[in-house]
Image: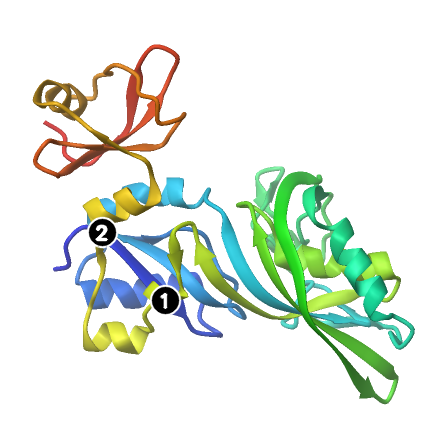
């Protein structure tokens, strides 16, 4: 059975995130496997998995910044805002110039209000939006504040078909947790008056984990490699080295004195290098959030 830690998978296309988790459970020979942030089946790239005690990290890794390489097609909408959905209105995009594309991207950069896609896991009235969408019901989704730190156009191509021209935009996006790249494609198309949807998506980074660390499922089947728990915590969060007395307190779930490492999470390590917990700073103390090695 694999030890506690993190596995960075290069998710293949047409696999759900749950499919990857199920496969990894077999490779790691443990049921305790989870993922830090779903990727749609169409998408590929970095999917961070927690193994054993590493599953306790996942809720905190989910909130980290992410990077994507995306292709947006202007001139066609779909009911899912991506290529997996049913096509809707087709509009000739031949009049959309490069300058207009860059201007639309600029308007979607920074702190923005984004309405999630109808086909999303957002709950409305206690029910997932995608379930309502499958039943043919449209739900009202409220805009949410997200941050698009970088939205950079890397290429603009024109593709002709019988109804005119599509404009395909390749882009690199750095964004906060909760940002839907599909929604960026939809909103960009609406802004330009021709509609749009996402045709390709590859996640290139989740927090400190990028494609250079990712392994395909075939590679993991040949040699199961993972980031040990202590290293996974150290690369993702600030580190506080505890004294022996502080270690005993934290292992029992007790608070200790504050640190100058920001609000947290902060990795809390015993003098011998073992990772004991994740903590958060309050005004006058530090409180354990997750204890990996309880007393």
Residues under labels 1 and 2: Cα distance? 18 Å
Q: Which residue is mark 1?
A: 212
Q: Quadrant of residue 10?
A: bottom left
Outermost residue to the bottom: 162
The answer to whether residue 135 is visible is no
Secondary structure of the residue carrying numbered label 2? strand
Give whichever of 86, 288 is nearer the camera. Answer: 288
What residue lies at 38% left-to-right and 51% top-to-bottom?
208
Task: Name above or below for residue 277 compared with residue 158.
Answer: above
Q: Quadrant of residue 35?
A: bottom left
Q: Position of residue 56 (x, y in %)?
A: 29, 41
Is residue 39 toward the left or the right of residue 268 in the image? Answer: right
Give whichever of 49, 69 is nearer the camera. Answer: 69
* Residue neighbourhood size for the residue with mark 1, other residues' Cα within 10 Å, grouped as few (<14), some (14–19), many (≥20): few
Q: Disc 1 vs disc 2: Cβ atoms closer than 8 Å?
A: no
Q: Which residue is mark 2?
A: 5
Q: Position of residue 230 (x, y in %)?
A: 20, 45
């Amino acid at each position: 059975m694999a030890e506690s830690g993190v596995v960075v998978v290069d998710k293949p296309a047409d696999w759900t995130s749950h499919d990857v988790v199920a496969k990894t459970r077999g490779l790691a020979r443990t049921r305790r496997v989870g993922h830090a942030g779903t990727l749609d089946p169409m998408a590929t790239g970095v999917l961070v998995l927690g193994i054993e005690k590493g599953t306790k990290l996942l809720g905190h890794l989910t909130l980290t910044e992410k990077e994507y390489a995306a292709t947006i097609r202007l001139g066609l909408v779909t009911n899912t805002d991506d290529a997996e959905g049913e096509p809707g209105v087709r509009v000739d995009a031949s009049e959309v110039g490069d300058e207009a594309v860059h201007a639309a991207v600029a308007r979607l950069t920074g702190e923005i209000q984004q309405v999630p896609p109808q086909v999303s896991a957002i709950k409305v009235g206690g029910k997932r939006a995608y379930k309502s969408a499958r039943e043919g019901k449209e739900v009202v989704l409220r805009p949410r504040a997200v941050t698009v730190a970088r939205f950079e156009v890397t290429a603009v191509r024109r593709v002709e078909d019988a109804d005119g021209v599509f404009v395909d935009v390749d882009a690199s996006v750095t964004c906060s947790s909760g940002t839907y790249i599909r929604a960026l494609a939809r909103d960009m198309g609406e802004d330009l008056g021709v509609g749009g949807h996402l045709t390709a998506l590859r996640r290139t980074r989740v927090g400190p984990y990028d494609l250079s660390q990712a392994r395909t499922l075939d590679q993991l089947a040949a040699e199961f490699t993972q980031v040990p728990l202590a290293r996974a915590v150290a690369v993702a969060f600030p580190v506080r080295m505890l004294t022996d007395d502080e270690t005993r307190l934290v292992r029992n779930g007790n608070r200790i004195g504050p640190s100058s490492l920001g609000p947290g999470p902060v990795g809390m390590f015993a003098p011998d290098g073992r990772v004991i917990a994740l903590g958060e700073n309050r005004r006058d103390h530090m409180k354990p959030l997750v204890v990996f090695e309880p007393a």
